[in-house]
Image (cartoon, coloured by chain):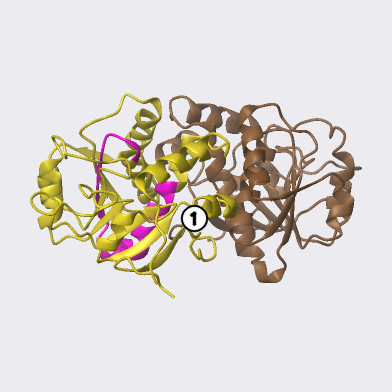
Chain colours: A yellow, B brown
């Protein structure tokens, strides 16, 4: 059975709706999204498997989710390092970065070198609003993610993938297929090309909204902020 | 071994610090505080023990934590009802209430009557900034909490208790001793008089801040946003 998915355009409209008529602030949504990512990382890679988590953060909301996840991972007892080369001037992102600095989380300048001492990588570079070309300094990050043997958890989208069509047909990113993917609120069409373990996070969508946007709220368990929905883009029955 | 506590004055200073130099927004802190309360309720009263949770919300931040907890409880599969007689005009609280309305959470006008069909009660009426007298319409709520056999989880303080000195010596609230207490960030001195199971929530405090304010970050487990710290105001070894 195929998963219902949400196009990039619909995901943008949903975000806008949550923050207008839905009455959520971006602080709330990003906190819950990043929290769900941190819980997935704990689930697939508990601290006893190696507590050095490298989080690659892009310049937009996907990067913000990564910053929140890094903070929670730090509280869980991991030693996160954050690669955040294009810092936004947006007040929220600046505050999320400051919260990490106060926890003495390490910000690294050289992604390739930081990878050498990482046990797990979180790819929070690009999310559902990505399209077109991977801009500097991220091509070398995508290349490293593509080539590494270290397990990678991607946030919302494997970075460099087209939201509707999946991986580029050739060149940079075409061979990137992370071990884990956390789709936020709902899977995007690219999930058809994904081969790893697939989770959904963002436990804040009302049944009415899910119905309007024609996707399913996954079967969250207990107080979990994430649900595992299947492998390789199929739906677990 | 006695628990280290935080006076009402110190708790106010800590909140102020978190939201200034700590760079947190109140949306973030309230989301995480309310989330921790919802997790404690799930822990002590899972849905199969009865899923009707009545949440009494006061006019201030304690009430806001209750509104957030109600939303998460709804997502966990409970049927929360909210008593919120003194709605704040503050934008955040209005948004938190709207988020509940969108989930079709029931707002009730008559607390005593709503209690008749509740399996568990959350007391989010007054928090660490309470002092002095219980104002209308809350005296009858305190009286009902004092007399009920339904288990009650209090948020930060059993409402009507003095933050430093505990329950009033006589009259309203003097016999109120809830089954569960969730202290937010750190226990307040009133905990010495508390006889139930005691939890701490609010997993966002840095070790440096805890050191400055001379309290201990509790031993959180896994991804839990709460930790059980003892019974009756003592510290679990």
Q: Does the magenta stretch include residue A233?
A: no
- Residue at the image position 39 percent from the left and 57 percent from the top: A5
In the displayed structure, A94 sits above or below A237; it is above
**Split into 4 quadrants, where in the image is the C terminus of chain A?**
bottom left
Along the line of sight, the residue nearer the viewer: B213 or B24: B24
Counting from the top left corner in percent of width and height, residue A125 is at 25, 43
Residue B214 visible to the viewer: no
Q: What stretch is highlighted in magenta?
A: A33-61
- Residue at the image position 77 percent from the left and 63 percent from the top: B119
Counting from the top left corner in percent of width and height, residue B4 is at 57, 45
Q: Quadrant location of residue B85? A: top right
Taking the image as shown, residue B110 lies to the left or right of residue A204, namely right
In which chain is the residue bearing label 1? A
Counting from the top left corner in percent of width and height, residue B126 is at 73, 38
Q: How many dots with numbers? A: 1
Q: Mark 1 points at which residue?
A: A214
Q: Quadrant location of residue B195? A: bottom right
- Residue at the image position 42 percent from the left and 53 percent from the top: A36
């Amino acid at each position: 059975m195929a998963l219902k998915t949400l196009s990039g355009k619909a995901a943008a409209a949903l975000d806008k709706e949550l923050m207008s008529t839905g009455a959520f602030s971006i602080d709330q949504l990003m906190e819950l999204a990043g929290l769900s990512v941190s819980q997935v990382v704990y689930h697939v890679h508990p601290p006893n498997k190696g507590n050095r988590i490298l989080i690659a953060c892009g310049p937009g909301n996907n990067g913000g989710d990564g910053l929140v996840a890094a903070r929670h991972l730090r509280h869980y007892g991991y030693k996160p390092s954050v690669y955040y080369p294009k810092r936004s001037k947006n007040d929220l992102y600046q505050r999320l970065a400051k919260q990490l600095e106060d926890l003495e989380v390490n910000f690294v300048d050289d992604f390739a070198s930081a990878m050498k001492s990482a046990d797990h990588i979180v790819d929070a570079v690009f999310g559902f609003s990505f399209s077109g070309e991977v801009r500097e300094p991220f091509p070398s990050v995508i290349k490293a993610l593509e080539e590494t043997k270290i397990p990678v958890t991607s946030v919302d989208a494997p970075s460099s993938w087209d939201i509707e069509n999946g991986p580029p047909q050739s060149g940079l990113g075409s061979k990137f297929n992370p071990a884990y993917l956390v789709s936020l609120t709902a899977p995007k069409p690219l999930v058809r090309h994904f081969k790893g373990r697939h989770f959904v996070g963002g436990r804040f969508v009302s049944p009415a909204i899910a119905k309007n946007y024609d996707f399913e709220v996954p079967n969250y368990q207990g107080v979990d902020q994430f649900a595992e929905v299947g492998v390789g883009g199929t739906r677990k029955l």
